[in-house]
Image (tube, rainbow, N blue to C red):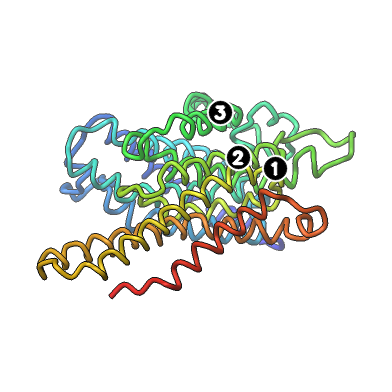
Amino acid sequence: MKNSQEMVRASLLPLFNNIAEDLNQTVLNLEQKRYSYIKGTLQRGTTSLAYIHMVLLPVLSSLLDHLGKNNYGVDLFENEIQLAGYKILNALWIIGTKGRKFVDREWIIEELNRHRPLVGDCLSSFASCFPVAFFEPEFNTNNKNASNVSQLSPEAHDVMTNISRTIPNLTKLIADIEEHAESRVKYEDAPYVVEVILPCLCSYLSYWWSMGPEKIKQITEPQITNVTANHMNSVLGSVLKLINNNIDAIEAPWMKHIAVYTQTIIFNSSTNLVEPYFLPVSQRIKSKCEDLFTQEQSLKTATRLESSEREDLELDLMKDYEILVRDIYAFGPLLIKYVDIHRSYWLKNGDKYAEELYNNMAEVFSVWCKSKVN
């Protein structure tokens, strides 16, 4: 890539243009309720959801991941390819956050719901390699990698206008996530927040912090982003609140994946997050663990139960343990990485809340070791 930039760009331009066209056609089909096109029953000119979800998104995510890991996005996304990137961003955002609002067919809604995390993964990969801070367009004029896309053609001007209407500003986005966490909105009411917006935002913050005001100290350097550790701490706090709100929730599939993308923003976390965010989650998990252990012991000593009744109670208990494992899986990876970062500080300075956090989790695993569910 570094040695043959023009050749690589020329080779990949048709691919990105075709991907952008397929995604935008899918948006149009959803908006205009073209159900035969969405289902793929027509052989020509179709962009079915099955193709988008099973072929296009996995291929695009893999390509964008490769670009991000090797820092090739800066070299690739120029001029026409950058325009195609904006088209892809706009379409993915609409499909992920608004797709199900356009249609009233149950099978389409189920299809969009089932594959929504794929859209979030793809946007996360996109945010890790796109060289323009698309959540902060006010800095585009300072960014040497921001092509003057709107001047390429009348269509390009329309694309950038649509982007400004579709993609929210960083400050508003973080405020909306905080409000979502505070208001205890159910997962079913706004699933796109945790499955689409959060993966994209976490990737965006970790990518742009290295080019933000806390990292670039030279006053002469033009500011191309305003991402700081405060943004990361705010989002991490909101994620922990969401986890706390959904401890013991039956329907919360996103809890199995949230730690994967949230870990990318922990490296700048503050020690002040222990008391308001980490400690409450550990307390709820500890209480739930103790409650299940008490139920288990009561079940073992209950000798007068019918066999069918005992089986039902054991089955319910096992399901509750499965949910507990899911909750720990959502919280544990974040806690481990957070402790690794701040352990030396706590050893030198001491922190009663960190000590309580440790005791809570130690109790969880101590009780768990005593448990013997048959």
Expressed as whole percent of the image width and height from the top left, the position of residue 303 reads: 18, 70
User: Of the residues tagged 3 and 2, which is closer to the observer?
Assistant: 2
SS at mark 2 in the image: helix
- CB contact under 8 Å: marks 1 and 2: yes
Q: Which residue is drawn at 73% across and 50% down?
A: 351
- CB contact under 8 Å: marks 3 and 2: no
Instruction: Indicate which disc residue 272 carries.
Output: 1
Residue position marked by numbered label 2 in the rendering: 276
Residue position marked by numbered label 3 in the rendering: 175
SS at mark 3 in the image: helix
Q: Which residue is drawn at 62% across and 37% down?
A: 234
Picture layout, residue 281 above or below residue 193:
below
Q: Is residue 154 or residue 269 the one in the foreground?
A: 269
The amino acid marked with disc number 2 is: Pro
Q: Quadrant of residue 346?
A: bottom right
Looking at the image, residue 308 sits to the left or right of residue 160; the answer is left
The amino acid marked with disc number 1 is: Asn
